[in-house]
Amino acid sequence: MAAAGALLSVPSVAAAAPAPADSVARNVVDEVIWVVGDEPILMSDVEAMRMQAAQEGTKWEGDPDCVIPEQLAVQKLFLHQAAIDSVEVTEADVQSQVDNYVDYWVQMAGSREKLEEYKKQSISQIRNELHDVVHDQLTTQEMRKKLVENIKVTPAEVRRYFGKLPQDSIPFVPTEVEVQIITQTPKVEQEEINRVKDELRSFTDRVNSGETSFATLARLYSEDTGSARAGGEIDYTGRGMLDPAFASVAFGLTDPKKVSKIVESEFGFHIIQLIDKRGDKIKVRHILLKPRISQTSIDNSLARLDSIRTDIVNGVFTFEAGATVISDDKDTRNNHGLMANVTQNTRTSKFQMQDLPPEVAKVVDTMKVGEISAPFQMINSRGKTVCAIVKLKNRVEGHKATITEDFQVMQELVLNKRKEEALHDWVVDKIKTTYVRVNDRYKDCKFVYQGWIK
């Protein structure tokens, strides 16, 4: 469970925390305990969160009778500001997150039937119950991001902060590695390409004949899991955010009733249907199919990489030269194969093990610096099967952070601290200008934010 003032926790199988369960509503005499603006907080909302925490074994930082309603009140402040600033989330994002939760619950319960039995609700009812809460969670996240998007920290601020930290407060930096990679993409047989194209043509025929809708086929067959759950929908997106081949065809569509020709992108093969155009952005549906790669093709790529590794070990050419000339990985080819760890705020070549692709982390974990791995198979960031060899360029064992070696770690720490301070101050200021009515029983609470009791 999040600390006071943070976002509500992810719903669990045990209890759909954000929406009061029927059992809670039956057992609690409901009443309005807080009002924030014109939004009430009900006793049943608080009890639902309390039940979830108990079933998950979560401990609250403070008295839950005070912490829970304050968390709910803070979220309502963010949601109110989001409405004023027109901060919105897409229905596709909401549905995708709902699907993620439901899929996770099904996995934990063992089957859809067991989940329905446990929750005493159908999957459809569970999804409907989650919808509004997920919408509010995502909207709150976006509002928080917007409020702190312009906050920056200077190197001087980072050094000052680090200089004042007591020794026992200096963060521990886990083991970090730098990894170079060479990949080979197994060849797809023409017969398999023909099979995929024939299937996409059959989808087009079924849509054109009125047998079914494009969205239905996308939900059933598209291998783009992110959009398939929303009927293949990709919300308003600029040309630069799309694969060039995909964008070229999508932006050329003019009739929403027509289905595009088959498009090959770096992700696979698509058909596309226009929904709407708005300025320089487009909203479309698509169905993605990925050709299956035969084991023979995979074995051939592994054998080629084994030969490349032998040549590097024997000094015929360097790993760096091989990565630049031979590798299929366009993200690392121009950087001598060095993998990049890109986050929202930083770009670095250093990875903690959990940040590497799992197949790479498993191989690198037992390697020595300078060693080159045997060839292995993995799924790349675009969801495609590739074969790879990696070289461990550097390893820095876990240690207490230093300003010279771990500046980016410290910068991230200071930046996050500044953002949390800014959000705290925003909430306090917002409380001052917002109508708040708190039930008398909460007036002795020790709240994180000042000003609730007026």
Image: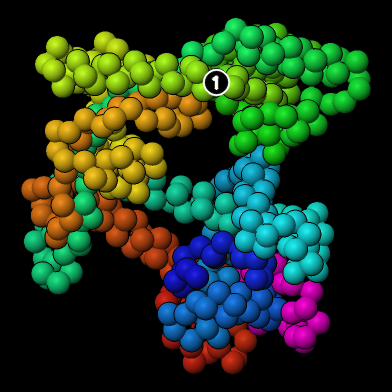
Quarter of the image holding residue 13?
Answer: bottom right
Q: Position of residue 228 (x, y in %)?
A: 68, 34
Q: Position of residue 261 (x, y in %)?
A: 70, 8
The correct choice, above or below, for 185 with respect to 123 in the image is above
Residue located beneath label 1 in the image? 293
Q: Position of residue 191 (x, y in %)?
A: 64, 9
**Total of numbered circles in the picture?**
1
- The residue drawn where x is 34% and y is 15% is 304
Residue 318 appears anywhere in the view: no
- The residue drawn where x is 44% and y is 71% is 3
Quarter of the image holding residue 335?
Answer: top left
Asked if residue 36 lies in the magenta stretch, the reply is yes
Quarter of the image holding residue 263?
Answer: top right
The correct choice, above or below, for 385 with respect to 81 in the image is above
- The residue drawn where x is 20% and y is 35% is 392
Asked if residue 452 lies in the magenta stretch, the reply is no
Q: Secondary structure at mark 1?
A: loop
Q: Residues within 10 Å of mark 1 (few under 14, many from 20)?
A: some
Q: Residue furthest right?
A: 210
- The residue drawn where x is 76% and y is 33% is 220
Q: State the colouring used for the structure image.
A: rainbow
Amino acid found under the numbered disc labelled 1: Ile
Q: Depth check: 49 or 41 in front? A: 49
Residue 186 appears anywhere in the view: yes
The correct choice, above or below, for 409 with respect to 65 in the image is above
Report the magenta residues as a range.
Answer: 17-40
Residue 47 left/right relative to 71:
right
Q: Position of residue 365 (x, y in %)?
A: 26, 46
Q: Depth check: 433 or 193 in front? A: 193
